[in-house]
Amino acid sequence: MISNENWLRIGKLVTPQGLHGEIRVKPYSDFEERFTQPGKRWLKNKEETDLLQVKLISGRRVPGKEIFVVRFAEINNRTEAEKLIGANLLVPSSDRPKLAENEFHLLDLVGLEARLKPNGPLIGMVTNLTNGGNDLLEIKLLEGRTVLIPFVHAIVPVVDLKEGWLLLTPPPGLLEL
């Protein structure tokens, strides 16, 4: 059985590219080198419990798009590439790049409490971070709705990972959208 704590999902294989086994990957990581630097990666389908180790031999970003085209040593044609569509691309959780101050890994943000005052009550929980041109926090409010909050310092001025919460200072109406 695979423990999710041991792996980071960095992307999803979405479609073959051409006839020679290249695959388009939707990235879940801001670290471009995860898709361009050669080395070991792992694939996991939802139905599988085992991981498939692959060797990334090349990768490039598609100009103007949030997508990468990668080539694995083990995949030599379109038919082989098609069998992998939908698989998640993984790296060991120990392979976390060092971050600058006020930068965060997605997995560190998911599950944080959202508050409107530092000692105030919980208003919701961070459930995801999406990219819609800018990073957007998905926050499930206690009332059940999910809102998207721009992850910018003016609206999210404090992230306290040790205590497990973040502070929101949304402009009027943002939580009502």
Image: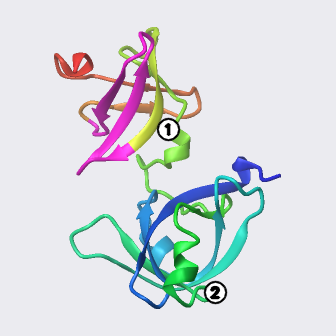
Task: Specify which label sits upstream in the sequence, 2 or 1.
Answer: 2
Q: Residue at x 49, y 46 (%)?
A: 106
Residue found at the far left of this picture: 172
Residue at 43 percent of width and 89 percent of height = 19
Closer to the camera in the image, 137 or 77: 77
Q: In the rendered image, which residue does mark 2 sit on?
A: 74
How is this picture coloured? rainbow
Element assignment for label 1: helix
Whether label 2 touches label 1, CB < 8 Å:
no
Q: CA distance from mark 2 to mark 1?
A: 34 Å
Residue 74 coordinates in the image, percent (x, y) = 64, 86
Q: Local crowd at mark 2 within 10 Å, few (<14), some, or many (≥20)?
A: some
- Residue 43 percent across, percent down from the top left: 64, 67
Tag 2 secondary structure: loop
- Mark carried by residue 109: 1
Pick whichever, 39 or 26, lies toward us. Answer: 26
In screen coordinates, is 67 left or right of 75?
left
The number of callouts visible is 2
Task: Reply yes or no: does residue 156 show up in magenta.
Answer: no
Give the quarter of the image for residue 162.
top right
Quarter holding the C terminus is top left
Picture coordinates of residue 57, whole percent (x, y): 54, 88
Q: Position of residue 26 (x, y in %)?
A: 41, 62
137 part of magenta stretch: yes
Relative to residue 16, is residue 101 depicted above or below?
above
Point 64% across, 53% down: residue:
46
Q: Amino acid at mark 1?
A: Leu
Question: Disc 2 residue type?
Answer: Glu
Left/right of residue 129 with respect to residue 160 in the rendered view = left
Q: Is residue 126 positioned above or below 128 on the image?
A: above
Which region shows up in magenta?
130-153
